[in-house]
Image (tube, rainbow, N blue to C red):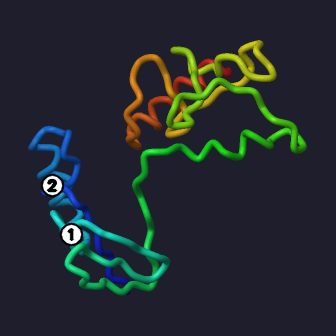
Amino acid sequence: KKQVILVDAQESILPIFPKAVVEYAHGWLKSRGVDIILGRKLISWDASRCIFEDESVLHADLVLNCFGGRANSQFLATASHGKYMDFLFTKSQNIVVGTTLQVQGGPIDDGSIFACGDVASPPTGNEKQAFQAECQAEVAAHNIL
């Protein structure tokens, strides 16, 4: 049996959600044996440890970094046999999409390319949360079919 520890620099998990949602998620995690460390910032981490601001170390078999403000869209620069893919990107390297999640601009500007999730920047908002990615996937699938 493995121990799972969730570390968040915020004083609460899911800080932008209503209190009832936060309490439910916290209870759900705790009921499944997840230890939660809140309000402690990391100064560095690697595959097997996290170092906190106070220089204490949390050792682990595996560390998963589940945050970040930049989309992993770099692969698109060389997606076509090393040829640069000329998509429209935001400053944080998100792909600009329309309300239907069709990519705006790019090498094939006929509406046949879709993007959703963290890499997409729809005009309806740019929050990067799992439930929004799931909703976007449904929209993209509906529009593709």
Q: Amino acid at mark 1?
A: Ile
Residue 109's x, y, as percent? 76, 15
Judge whether 13 appears above or below 54 on screen: above
Q: Earlier in the sequence, mark 2 or mark 1?
A: 2
Q: Relative to the observer, which residue lies in front, 61 or 25?
A: 61
Residue 103's x, y, as percent? 65, 22
Task: Name the quadrant of the N terminus.
Answer: bottom left
Mark 2 burial class by Cα count in 10 Å: few <14, some 14-19, many 20+: some
Numbered mark located on residue 4 in the image:
none
Q: Relative to the observer, which residue lies in front, 134 or 74?
A: 74
Residue under pointer 2: 12
Residue under pointer 1: 36
* Quadrant of the rendered image containing residue 102: top right
Horizontal side, residue 77 vs residue 99: left or right: right
Which residue ends up furthest to the right in the rendered image?
81
Residue at image location 26% in from the left, 75% down from the top: 52
Task: Name the quadrant of the C terminus.
Answer: top right
Q: Relative to the observer, which residue lies in front, 37 or 41?
A: 41
Residue 137's x, y, as percent? 54, 32
SS under mark 1: strand
Q: Relative to the observer, which residue lies in front, 46 or 124?
A: 46
Judge whether 17 appears above or below 46 on screen: above
Residue at image location 17% in from the left, 58% down from the top: 26
CA separation, marks 2 and 1?
A: 10 Å
Residue 56's x, y, as percent? 24, 84
Mark 1 burial class by Cα count in 10 Å: few <14, some 14-19, many 20+: some
Residue at image location 71% in from the left, 24% down from the top: 113
SS under mark 2: loop
Dots 2 and 1: beta carbons under 8 Å?
A: no
Label total for image: 2
Residue at image location 75% in from the left, 27% down from the top: 86
